Amino acid sequence: MMNTKRLADYIHRNGVKSAYYAIRQRLSDNRADKAYDREMKSCVIDEAKLKRQKETRFPYEPLISILVPTYKPENKYFREMLRSVKAQTYPKYELLLGNGGGISENTNAALSEAKGDYIALLDQDDFIEPEALYRIVLEINMGAKLIYTDEDKYDTEQDRYLRAFKKPDFDMELLLSNNYVCHFLTVERKLVNDVGGFRSEYDGAQDHDLVLRCAEKLGRREIGHVSRVLYHWRIHGGSTAGDPSEKSYAHTAGKRAIEDYLKRNGKHGTVIETEHRGFYRIEYDAGSGDGRVASSETSGKAEYELHLGQGIRPRRKGQEEELRAYLEANPDVGAIGGRVIDRRGRIMSSGYARDEDGCIAPCYIGQDYRLSGEFHMASLRREVDIISNQCVMLRPELESCRSGDSAKMCKRIRHKGYRIVVDPQTVYIKK
C-alpha cells in the first residue's frame, strides 16, 4: 500500500476519487512485487556463464569510466556498491568518486578526471549485476552511443526486491513524460562533453536533463536498450526511490528540463506535472495556421481529420484540438490516436506495441482506463507500432495511407519515415 505520507500528499493534490484508483493500482503492484521477490531470491548464480563472459574478447573494448557522486555515504551500502563494481566480468573500467559539492558538481568533477571512452553513472548506495558492463559493451559494439538497462528496486528494511521495470526501447514521447531511462545509464564521454556535461541548475533531475540533450544528437540506432535487470536501486530512509515526494525540488527540476527541451527545439507548450510525482504532460499550443479538425462523419475534409469508427464519441470536449496541436508541434509524427473504452470504462484500444518477448501485443486491453498501470506507463503518451484506424488523426499528406487494416495503414506510415503515437489522455467511448 501507499505509506500514509504519500497517500495524504496524493489526496491533497488530486482528491479522494483519484486516490481510490491509485490505491487499486497499488494493490495490483503489491501482488507483482511479491511474485518478483520470490523469483529473485530463487535465482542461482550461473558461474559458468560469468566465466565465459570474462573470457570474451570484443572487436572494440572501450574503457568505461564509472562515475559515482558521493555525499556522506552510509558505509555498509557504499561497500556493497564497490563490491558490485569489483565483480564485473568486463575488466576495462575505472571508478571515479566525486564529492564536496552538489550532485552535478560532484559528477562533473569525476567526469573531468575520466579517461574512458564511455561514462557510466552509478549512485553511491545502489548496486549492479556482474554482467552489467559486459552487456553494455555488447551494445557499444553494435554502434550505440547511449545505453540504458532495465532495473528494479531493493527495499533494505524489508529485505525484498520490488518488481522489475522492464523498459521499452527508446521512446522520446515517454522521455518527455518521465525519465524512464534512468539506470543504468552509459554514454559516450565525447557526447557528454559536447552537450556541456551536467548542469547544476537541474540537480535532482540532472540525469533527465542530460539524456534529453544527448538524445537530440543521436539517431535511433545509436541508442541501445539492454532488456535485462542489471541495476538495483536501493530503497532506504530518505531515498528518492523510497518516497519521491520527499524531493519536490527534483520534480520541479524535471519540469524545467522538459521546458528547456521545448525551447531548444522551437516547440511551444506548457509542461504540467500529472497526478503522479515526477511524471509530466506537455500541453502543446495550437499553431497559428488555420488547420481545423473535423470528424469523418461530417461533410467536407479538413486539414487534420479525426477518423472515428461508428458509435465512437469523445469523452470530453477539446480532445481533437489537442491531437491537432500535437501533430503541428511534432512534424516527425505521422499519426496519433486516442484511447477507446467501453461503457464500463474498460480499454478496448490503446495501440499495439512490442512486448518484452518482441511480439506485437495490444497495450493495456481490458484494464480500467482510470488505472495508471505499472510505473504509470499506461497514462503517458508513447510510441506504438500500430494504432487503430477507428480512432486516428493523420497528417494530410498521409491520408492515402488509410486502410481498413490498421496494421497495413501503420506500416505504410512508418515506411514513409514517420512515428506513430498514442495519447491515453484523449479518451473515446464506444457506445
Image: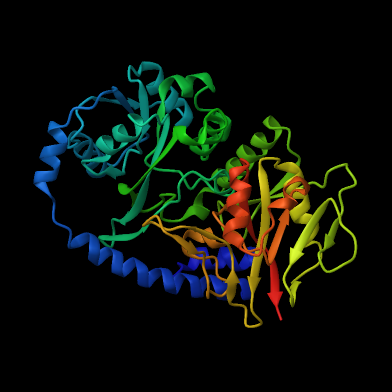
User: Looking at the image, is 79 positioned above or below residue 374?
Assistant: above
User: Looking at the image, is 5 positioned above or below residue 68?
Assistant: below
User: Looking at the image, is 185 positioned above or below residue 242?
Assistant: above
Quarter the C terminus occupies: bottom right
Q: Is residue 123 left or right of residue 132?
A: right
Residue drawn at the location 63% of the way across and 40% of the way down: 258
Could you tell me residue 257's position as x and y percent?
61, 37
Quarter the N terminus occupies: bottom left
Q: Is residue 232 left or right of residue 336?
A: left
Looking at the picture, tell me which residue is in the foreground, 361 or 201: 361
Colouring rule applied to residues: rainbow
User: Looking at the image, is 358 positioned above or below residue 249?
Assistant: below
Q: Is residue 147 left or right of residue 339?
A: left
Could one spot residue 360 in this view of the protein?
A: yes
Q: Is residue 250 left or right of residue 391?
A: left
Looking at the picture, tell me which residue is in the foreground, 244 or 257: 257
Residue drawn at the location 40% of the way across and 31% of the way down: 144
Could you tell me residue 259's position as x and y percent?
67, 39
Could one spot residue 15 in this view of the protein?
A: no
Residue drawn at the location 81% of the way across and 65% of the way down: 296
Looking at the picture, tell me which residue is in the foreground, 243 or 23: 23
Q: Quadrant of residue 57?
A: top left
Could you tell me residue 389's position as x and y percent?
66, 63
Q: Quadrant of residue 135?
A: top left
Q: How many marks?
A: 0
Residue drawn at the location 37% of the way across and 23% of the way down: 110
Could you tell me residue 66's position as x and y percent?
32, 29
